[in-house]
Image (spheres, grey):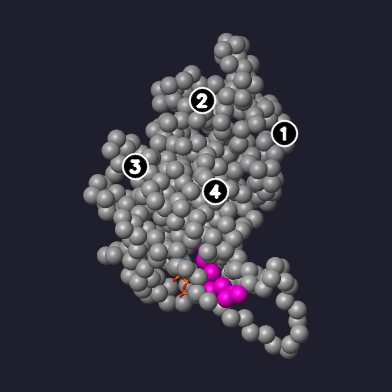
Amino acid sequence: MNVVLGITGGIAAYKAPDLVRRLRERGAEVQIVMTASAGEFVTETALQAVSGRPIRSNLWDKEAEAAMSHIELARWADVVLIAPATAEVMARIVSGGAPDLLSTICLATEAPIALAPAMNHVMWSNPATQANRQVLEERGIHILGPGIGSQACGETGAGRMLEPDAIAATVFSITGAKGKGLLEGRKVVVTAGPTREAIDPVRYITNRSSGKMGYAIASAAAAQGADVVLISGPVSISAPPGVDIVNVESAEDMYTATHDAITDADIFIAAAAVADYRPANLADQKIKKNDEAMNLHLVRCPDILASVAALDGAPFTVGFAAETENVIDYARGKLEKKKLDMIVANRVGKDCGFDRDDNAATVLWRGGERSFPNSSKVDLARHLIELAAKHFYAARGSETQPGLTVRSNID
Ligand code: CTP
């Protein structure tokens, strides 16, 4: 994967050499384009040493342009990543101006663009910056983070650049490029979204699942180099790049598709909100409202997760437990009852869980647990995949994959 890495003038630019290393560890070629002010925080010498390519910074550099013009550079990129992205560069991209090499490339590229904002929290929450963020997102530009925490200015808030490894992983999942990672050469099957259980030709029973958590997990697994099969109920989000998607409707369809895909899988993650019951009979014609009351006779749907965990030579199996109360107790019960390797417990209700972009969760396994505070589903998915990979290798008797260079951030 070819990455044009734009570095702009924020203090987080000091993390740029680490970011370049993380991208290269995953197999990316990195061409750095610096703005003039980035040079105040990080040197060209350091960046050239880690990227192995001459740094580009000047639109009017005749020699560099003769070797690869800015238009060729824009075409060469599989993704343009700007990290750190200052409020200034966000505004410049929104305006469509092209006063320098980096913004010219942003205008001239057809590749996806991702920005990792980094700035003082007041600058980030300023309505001008937020309006720019919104416009950029509406144009399909990926905004990675920012994180919340202590800042270089001594204050605390939202505006920290995400950690380099998190940015590198997300960039791979945006492009769908298979990176080198924790799950290279492994097959991961993920279920996601709701199921629809038909009552008659026009009606069905379903639930509020948006599929976002399962899709983020599938992306995160692909970003770690896995071959991913995503078995999805009906959702309105688009398939993540780099995964094989199988679209299904009912629990029965999802059961069949899962068992078709599972034979050679290493890890199975059941993030779908599968219906527990379906109408016993599917009416051939639309049911008419003849009576004051109506009874619908329901029968149990197959439990996909339990059926996979019960297979001989079952993959490392991870379930979800979406609960409104007694979250941890119910989740531990499901871990044991379904004989899972791991379960992700999360609270669902009016202001949490379903159909949102963020989530908090506690992951449980036999003999341990780990809580993740509320964060974007993309960040949470990355952590879940790292944790699952770590336990998968431990269960298989080896801590990490041989020859692995990308390390997990999970202790
Ligand atoms: N699951 C499944 N097949 C089903 C039902 C659930 O694979 N027919 C999976 C879900 O994908 C999730 C986990 O099982 O990983 C949820 O466990 P479950 O006990 O079914 O949770 P609930 O449906 O919430 O059950 P309950 O209503 O008893 O809490």
Q: Earlier in the sequence, mark 4 or mark 1?
A: 1
Real-space Cα distance between discs 1 and 2? 22 Å
Between disc 1 and disc 3, the foreground one is: 3
Residue 250 lies in quadrant: bottom right
Closest to the observer, 72 or 82: 72
Q: Secondary structure at mark 3?
A: loop
Q: Earlier in the sequence, mark 1 or mark 3?
A: 1
The overriding secondary structure of the stretch rendered in magenta is loop
Give the residue at mark 1: 96
Are the residues tagged 4 and 2 within 8 Å (C-beta)?
no
The location of residue 115, given as percent across then percent down, is 57, 40
Give the residue at mark 3: 407
Looking at the image, is 406 positioned above or below residue 149?
above
Q: Amino acid at mark 2?
A: Gln
Residue at far bottom of view:
292
Q: Amino acid at mark 3?
A: Arg
Are the residues tagged 1 and 3 within 8 Å (C-beta)?
no
Give the residue at mark 2: 31
Q: Residues within 10 Å of mark 3 (few under 14, many from 20)?
A: some
Residue 132 in view here: no
Q: Secondary structure at mark 2?
A: strand
Which residue is at a point 56% across and 33% down the rendered structure image?
Answer: 79
Between disc 3 and disc 2, the foreground one is: 3
